[in-house]
Image: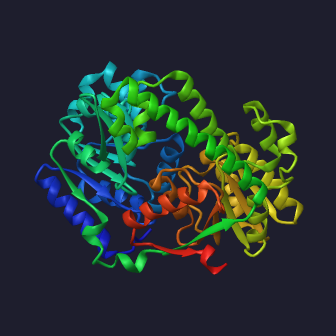
């Protein structure tokens, strides 16, 4: 297959070549749709064509898809093989010793090196896909995820090339009893020795704009007074417990009070607080998350367990406002993808859409033939909806979808951004219950996304239209 010439990719290849010649490791930011696999192929066949290389993928599916992609799109790479957890140690040693390019999961390779440390001597280049995933989001003493706390030392003679879709998030570390909010890029630079950074900003003035597919993001309120009432009751309870915790810390460890008030939820796991209060807060937060994210028919069970009286739950809607809004929006498009946090929501939406004549495809962690179902959705000629759980959506690109509905947001700007980019330039609807705390949550996340990833998103507030 002939590789299309793109100026920004040529720029990256030239920069990598220069930096590697200077024996510098590299941390490369490369957004969704910019061709990480194309660049990986070019690195392996142009710059590193005579070097011993290990490529680390973060999941089994990503490993298999990368092997398939390199083989089908480019006819394979001479001397390329992979090691997997099912192989015995001696066979893994044989593969590493007798092939030039090895694809592996980090834990499998680390375990192999523990048994045969001499294998590291010949490895010249390490390529890490999704390098941001080696950093722990909240860390106490150990900043890197297992096994990277060992791997970086086991392979300290090699040059590292780390690639990631985005490198603009923060993480928390506890250092000498002080809590710090750290930029992940700064942390990676410290743990990847002698590293240079290539960010998207560096090649924005190339032909990159010609290949970026802008995503139209609609911040979309949902009116559901009955569900909003429940959320607001829970929010008031959360505020009360939060004040109890702050008062408790004020008495027991006043030195932690400033940090707690500044970054309450991030600091809380690292501060000594009465267990009963923590459990009460966590139950309330989880319960509110359920109401944000689950079908209306599930509310009662969770609320009664917490202590709500049955008489106070008579007004719970049969179908939630979000469920009805998904149906309303999906009817207007030929192909819709819905991203949900819970399996019960996936099942409920599947049934609601199916009842209205929309062909549905469901992918969750329980599905073994994920790729087959995704392809059926992509090739479907009917009005269709693909409904995904977080595990189902992992490592997924769906350029065929016209619309992505994010049913409920998590608090991570990076995660939400990655969800929105699954469709490669399609419309996105971010749903939230109007007149509730979820509105502020969405506002906070969207504000961070707009600051960190300004090059490919256009935001619309549907609330203003109303």
Q: Is residue 299 left or right of residue 271?
A: right
Residue 326 place in picture, x, y as percent = 74, 64
> Front-most of 251 and 319?
251
Query: How many numbered discs?
Result: 0
Q: Is residue 273 left or right of residue 140?
A: right
Q: Quadrant of the N terminus?
A: bottom left
Front one among 167 and 26: 167
Q: Is 174 on the left-hand or right-hand side of 309?
A: left
Query: Where 183 sits versus 243, above or below?
Result: below
User: Where is residue 79, by image quadrant?
Assistant: top left
Q: Is residue 208 visible?
A: yes
Where is residue 435? Give x, y as percent: 65, 61
The residue at the point 13 percent across, 49 percent down is 23
Is 176 left or right of 219, judged from the image as shown?
A: left
Residue 275: percent from left, percent from top = 52, 22
The reply to whether residue 369 is in sight is no
Spot occupied by residue 456 in the image (x, y as percentages of width and height):
44, 72
Q: Which of the two residues, 357 or 88, is positioned nearer the viewer here?
A: 357
Q: Quadrant of the C terminus?
A: bottom right
């Amino acid at each position: 297959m002939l590789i299309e010439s793109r100026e920004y990719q040529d720029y990256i290849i030239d920069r990598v070549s220069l930096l590697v010649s200077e024996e510098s490791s590299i941390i490369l930011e490369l957004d969704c749709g910019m061709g990480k696999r194309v660049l990986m192929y070019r690195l392996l066949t142009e710059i590193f064509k005579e070097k011993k290389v290990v490529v680390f993928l973060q999941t089994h599916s990503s490993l298999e898809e990368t092997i398939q992609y390199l083989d089908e799109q480019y006819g394979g790479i001479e001397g390329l093989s992979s090691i997997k957890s099912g192989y015995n140690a001696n066979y893994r040693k044989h593969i590493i010793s007798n092939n030039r390019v090895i694809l592996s999961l980090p834990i499998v390779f680390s375990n192999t090196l523990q048994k045969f440390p001499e294998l590291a001597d010949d490895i010249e280049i390490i390529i890490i896909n999704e390098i941001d995933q080696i950093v722990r989001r909240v860390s106490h003493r150990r900043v890197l995820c297992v096994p990277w706390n060992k791997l970086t030392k086991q392979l300290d003679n090699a040059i590292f090339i780390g690639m990631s879709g985005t490198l603009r998030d923060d993480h928390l570390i506890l250092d000498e009893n002080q809590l710090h909010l750290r930029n992940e890029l700064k942390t990676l630079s410290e743990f990847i020795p002698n590293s240079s950074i290539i960010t998207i900003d560096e090649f924005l003035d190339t032909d990159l704009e010609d290949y970026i597919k802008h995503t139209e993001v609609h911040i979309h309120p949902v009116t559901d007074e009955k569900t909003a009432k429940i959320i607001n009751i829970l929010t008031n309870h959360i505020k009360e417990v939060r004040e109890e915790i702050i008062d408790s810390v004020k008495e027991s460890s006043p030195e932690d009070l400033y940090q707690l008030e500044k970054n309450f939820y991030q600091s809380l796991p690292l501060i000594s607080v009465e267990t009963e209060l923590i459990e009460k807060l966590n139950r309330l937060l989880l319960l509110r998350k359920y109401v944000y994210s689950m079908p209306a028919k599930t509310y009662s069970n969770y609320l009664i367990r917490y202590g709500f009286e049955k008489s106070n739950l008579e007004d719970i809607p049969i179908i939630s406002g979000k469920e009805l809004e998904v149906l309303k929006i999906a009817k207007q498009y030929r192909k819709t993808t819905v991203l949900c946090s819970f399996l019960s929501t996936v099942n409920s939406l599947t049934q609601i859409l199916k009842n209205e004549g929309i062909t549905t495809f469901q992918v969750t962690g329980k599905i073994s033939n994920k790729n087959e179902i995704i392809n059926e959705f992509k090739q479907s000629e009917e009005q269709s909806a693909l409904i995904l759980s977080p595990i189902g959506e992992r490592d997924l690109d769906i350029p065929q979808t016209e619309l992505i509905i994010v049913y409920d947001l998590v608090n991570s700007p990076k995660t939400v951004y990655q969800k929105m980019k699954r469709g490669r330039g399609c419309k996105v609807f971010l749903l939230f219950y109007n007149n509730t705390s979820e509105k502020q949550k969405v506002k906070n996340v969207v504000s961070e996304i707009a600051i960190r990833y300004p090059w490919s998103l256009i935001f619309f507030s549907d609330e203003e239209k109303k």
